[in-house]
Each structure stands twice: as C-alpha cells, then as structure tokens.
Image (cartoon, grey):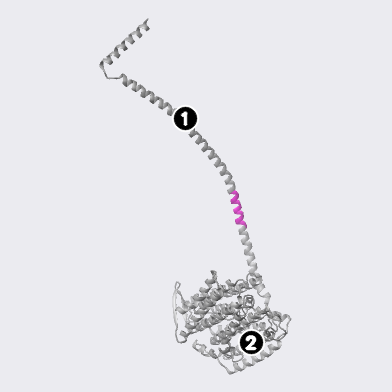
Amino acid sequence: MIYLLLIFLAPAAASLWTLFGGKKEGYVSLAGAAISTGASAALFWSVAGGFAASWSFAGFPGLPFRLEVSYLNGLLSLVVGLVATLIFLYAIGYMGEQKGKWRFWSSISLFLGAMQLLLFAGDWILFVIAWEVLGFCSYLLISTKHWNAETGRAANKVFLINRFADLGLYIGVFVIILGSGSSKIAEVPQASLSQVGALALLLAAAGKSAQVPFQSWLAAAMKGPTPVSALLHSATMVAAGIVLLIKAFPLFSPGMLVWIGAVGGITILMTGLTAIFSDDIKEMLAASSSSQLGFMVLAIGAGSPGAALAHLVAHAFMKSSLFLGAGIWQHGAGSTQFEQLTGAGKKLKVTFTGFGVAAVALAGIPPFVGYFSKDGVLAAGLQSSLPEWYFLAALGGALLTAMYMSRALGILWKGEAGEIQNSRGLRWMQGGLLAMLVFVIGGGFLLHNMMEMAGFTLPKAQAAQIGGLLAALAGLVAGWLMAGKTYHHSAVKFIRNNYPLAGGYHVLVNRPVMQLARRCRRIDESIHRVVLQAGRSALKLSEAAGVSDGLLHRGVFGFGKFGLRLGNWSRRSDERGIDRLIAFLVAKVQALGRYGRRIQSGLVHRELLWSVWGLVVFVALMFLILM
C-alpha cells in the first residue's frame, strides 16, 4: 500500500510545493516524478511476481471507491512514470527561467498524480474524478502562456471539445451503474453494455484520444510548451481514452466493436494525410498522434485489446522522443515551421540522430519497438471478422506513417540551415531524448512477454509482417522524395486544416458558444442594470430619509435643549425660592418653639403671675374700649 500511496502523493506534494511558492520547482517536480516512478517500479516488480490487491474506502452510499493493483495497472503506471520522469528532466532545460514556469510545474506534477490515479481506479466514479482532473490540468498546461491571445484561444478550443465529449463518460458510467447496481470496474461483467452506454463511452474515448471528428483539438494544443505535448499528447492524456476502451472492453458487444473499429480506421487515414501535408513539425506530430491512437482504437474494434496495449506502450516512448526532438528544434531555430527548420539537422546532429531513430521506429522498421507493435495491430486486423477493412486501413496507415516521418527527416536534413542557437538547457533536453530512446531501441523484444503477463495476447501473422514492412519501406522512399516540396492546392489546405466541414470548429462550435456567451453577457448586463437602478433608487430614498431624519434630529435636539433649560430653571428656583422659604419657615417655627419652651417653664407661681398680668391687661383694654 505504501508504494501505491507514493505513486500518487509524491507528484501531488511537488505540485503543492510549487503552488505555494517553493523554490527550485523544476528539481522538486523531477524528484516527485522520480519517487513516483521508483514506487511504480517496486510495485511492478511485485505484480510481476503474482501480487494483486484491492482496497475499498468511503465513497458514495453503496458505491465505495476502489483501488486495484494488477499487472496491467502496474505496467501502465511504470510506463507513465518513466516517460514523465524523462520529460521532466528535459523540461528543466526547456523551461529555464521562462515566464509562467510555476504554473507549468505545479500543473504538470498534479497531472502526473491524476494519471496514475486513473490507472489504478477500480471503480468508475474514481475513474471519472481522475479523468476530470486530467482535463483541468491539460487546460492549465496548454494555457501556460495565457497572456498570449492565440494560446488562450487554443486552450479554449481544447476545453470546449473535450467538455462536450466528456458528457459521454458521464452517460456511459450512469448506464453501467444503473444496469449492474455497482460502480466496480468488472473484468467479467454479467452482461454486455447497452448500445446507448457503449456509444457514450466511445464518444468520451474519441474526444480524449482525438479521434474523428474531434481530432482538430490536438493540433490546437500544440500552442502549449513542448514538454506538455510530449507528456499529455503522446503518452498520458490522449492515452486515457484508450485505457477507457481497454477497461470497458468486456462490456462491448460484437456489434459495438464494429463501430469502434470504424472510428479507428477512419482516423488512421484522415489524420495520416493531415500529417503528410502539415507545414509545422509539432502540428505534424499532433496529427500523427491522432493517427497512431487510431491504430489502437482499430485494434480494440478488431477484438484485440492486447495489440492496442502493446502499441500504446510503444507509442508513448516513440512519440515522446519525437516531441522532445521537436522542442530542441524550436529552441534552436525559434520556430516550429518546416520552412524555418530546413537543414537544421546538420547543425544539431545528436538531436537529429535521436529524432531519426524514433521516426524510423514509428514507421515500423525492425528491430525497433514500433515494428513489433505495428505488426501486432496489422495481424489483429488480418485475423478479425472484417479483414478487408481492418487490415487494409492499418496497412494504409503504415504507409502514411512512414511517408510523413520520412518527409520530416528530409526537410530537417536537406538544404541550407539557418541560424541555430544552442540554448542553455540543451544538455538537459538531449539527455532526456537519448534516455527515452533506450526503450525505443530495445523494447520490442519485451512486448510479447509483457502482454502475456497482462493477460493479453499479441497477435502474429507472417502476411502482416511482410505487408507492414513493405508499406514502411515504400513510405520512407516516397516521403523522402516529397521533402522540400510545397503544395498550395485547396484540397491540400482542406486536409491540412483538419477537414473543416461546414466551417469546422469555428462555425460549428466556437461561433455558437460565443453567441451563447454574448447572450448570457447581455442578460447579465441587464440584471446588472436593474440591480444598479434599484441601488440608485434606494440611495435616493436613503438620502431623502436622511434629510427628514436630520429635521427630526434637530427638532428632538431643540426640544431636549428646551427641556434641559427648563430643568435648570426649575432647579435654580427650587434652590433659590422654595428651598429658602421652607428653610425660613422652619427656622421661625423652631425659634417660636424655643420661645414657647422658655415660657412654658412648668412653675406654678410663675404661671399664676402670668395669669394675673393677663387679667390686668384684659381689664385695661376693656376699660379703654367702653369709654
């Protein structure tokens, strides 16, 4: 369990380190990827010895989350880890001190953790969660240089197309859970998936893996940094659609496999032609990725998920090597346009050699890994129920693959090279490229045993080997002869622009979405105006209330002031009038009382004396009155 946790948590910790301003983000991200890869290698060693495990933990009611460890998951995890580590090594030199590198390193580390989670997801809900994180990180990485308007438009295009296709995954998972009552990814399901659910999953896989009619988003994604293209658009994100089809393969009925094979075969041929006529090396590799993913989809439709898995593993190393080489050309010449790269291989011979080895391997020339994986797809088509379609489509794709890779090599070698600069991080980039080639050169001898241990078979057929080799040789010659020639026909432009029927993406997707966005903006502005007007009215009412409140305040204040003055007058009148009068009366009464107390002495002879004197006074007064 500790190895499984390290696979997820090491890149996640590196992402958080960068997100919160940690220094040396490139080296920390590389360390996180290396730790994750080391844990993947240890886990793969265990599963190769027969170890398998499953863990359930809290999720939705009745639908717990699950992590499954099997040989298939361990193999894919090791491939993703190795490719990611070498691309991180390359990216240290590529990104250097470029603006936006903190966003790049944080997002790409989180992407690695999410891709590993998707591989080990044992239930469909956890699979959807990891799938969504992949899409979110892809948007962030493509828009690393978000201040560039063209890059922003490209990121929006990728986002819109993938969001539409992702609806298929939600519908498909809903149908699976509704039908089985469980979210577990079952190796042996009780029944086949309904037509609606199967078509929904095919829609999701076609969108994520850039299959027709969603292939154009992959060319737009090339506006992101080259390490993003090398990791996301060759080995991981676009491969998620193939992983989905492999995991869901037991659910598909034979009738549904025909639809899957049709999508893969059409994509092989259409995007192969686009790659031949591309005038940009990264866009050529993008179209090539769609075509090679078409080989995998075709193999699944032919009933051979083992052939699809083998080509998935081989393609991850071959195409990543090619993208890393394209990034070195871009740094040296300052452009990815073929007209600016004419003869550039003569200036960077080490890079040209590595690029050439990967190109020949992808074309299907022995003893490189692409020869074995491509022949597996051809043999699967030959042994299928519809060999006239599967085999011929794959054979045509093999011819086109050799043609566009040989044409690219011819352009890079022929002619006079312009100014090519050696960037500061050239050694880091070349080191990542050369390390990637180890599996490209010797991995073919391991494919058969790897597929058997994963529980799959890699088909073999002598006719497929001979046909594939002849197609590859013919394509290499034809492509070399095409190098340096320009094509301006309207049909070529139509193919180069990814077959924009009825106006293509801009008319069918971008324009309606932008119109909807403008209408939503107008509605929002209307709501804003209403709210603003209501606010102004409330403000005026408040101001009016403030005036009346001021008058009321002054009135109350004046009344209070009058009351205070009246109270002061009353206090003074009390102190100076009533209080003094009462005090005077009290004093007089007290004096009279004292006088009366002196008179009322209580002596009899004195009382008789006062009585006699009173009688004398009374008689005298009467005498005076009567006279």
Magenta residue span: 529-541
Give the image location of residue 303, x and y in percent: 55, 87
Disc 2 marks a residue whose amino acid type is Thr
Is residue 474 or residue 593 the one in the foreground?
593
- Classify mark 1: helix, strand or loop: helix
- Classify mark 2: helix, strand or loop: helix
Residue ID at (61%, 61%): 524
In the rendered structure, does residue 163 fall within the stretch colored magenta? Answer: no
Disc 1 marks a residue whose amino acid type is Ser
Residue ID at (41%, 25%): 584
Is residue 566 or residue 255 the one in the foreground?
566
Q: Is residue 102 left or right of residue 54?
A: right
Report if residue 225 is visible in the image.
Answer: yes
Q: How many marks?
A: 2
Q: In the rendered image of this protein, does residue 573 appear above or below residue 268?
A: above
N-terminal-most mark, 1 or 2: 2
Residue denoted by label 2: 353
Give the image location of residue 482, x and y in percent: 71, 87
Give the image location of residue 420, x and y in percent: 68, 80
Secondary structure mainly formed by the magenta segment: helix
Numbered mark located on residue 538 in the image:
none
Q: In the rendered image of this protein, does residue 13 appear above or below residue 597?
A: below
Q: In the rendered image of this protein, does residue 525 appear above or below residue 614?
A: below
Numbered mark located on residue 573 in the image:
1
Give the image location of residue 558, x and y in percent: 54, 38
Report if residue 384 is visible in the image.
Answer: no
